[in-house]
Amino acid sequence: MGSCSNVESNRARCPCTWEPCPRKGICCECLRYHLSHGELPGCCFPPQAERTYDRSFAHFARLYR
């Protein structure tokens, strides 16, 4: 993983509830990881939806249709 000069401020604002995540606060790594798995990162979802850990595009579309 790369370094990020904003990791602490990013981590403080990150709404992701998956605590063992090694990418927390390194937004570019998080986005790269989730997109490579065909999903969106938790920060794209409202709190209740994020807590389901369903990060699929279909879940996102259902929320905003």
Image (spheres, rainbow, N blue to C red):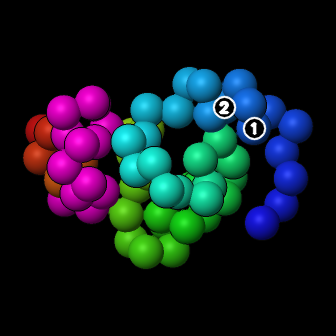
- Write down the quadrant of residue 38 in the picture: bottom left
Q: Is residue 38 left or right of residue 30?
A: left
The dot on residue 49 is none
Residue at position x 83%, y 60% in the image? 2
Percent x, y for residue 14?
52, 33
Q: Nearer the viewer, residue 11 or 37?
A: 11
Q: Are marks 1 and 2 in contact (CB under 8 Å)?
A: yes
- Asked if the magenta segment contains residue 43, the reply would be no
Percent x, y for residue 42?
39, 45
Q: Is residue 14 left or right of residue 10?
A: left
Residue at position x 75%, y 38% in the image? 7
Residue that badge 2 annotates: 10
| Label total for image | 2
Q: Which type of secondary structure does the marked residue at label 1 adopt?
A: helix
Image: magenta residue range: 45-58
Alpha carbon separation for disc pair 1 and 2: 5 Å
Q: Which type of secondary structure does the marked residue at label 2 adopt?
A: helix
Three-letter code for the amino acid on which mark 1 is drawn: Val
Residue that badge 1 annotates: 7
Percent x, y for residue 36?
51, 74
Can residue 57 be seen here? The reply is no
Mark 2 neighbour density, 10 Å: few (under 14) some (14–19) many (20 or more): some
Can residue 45 be seen here? The reply is yes
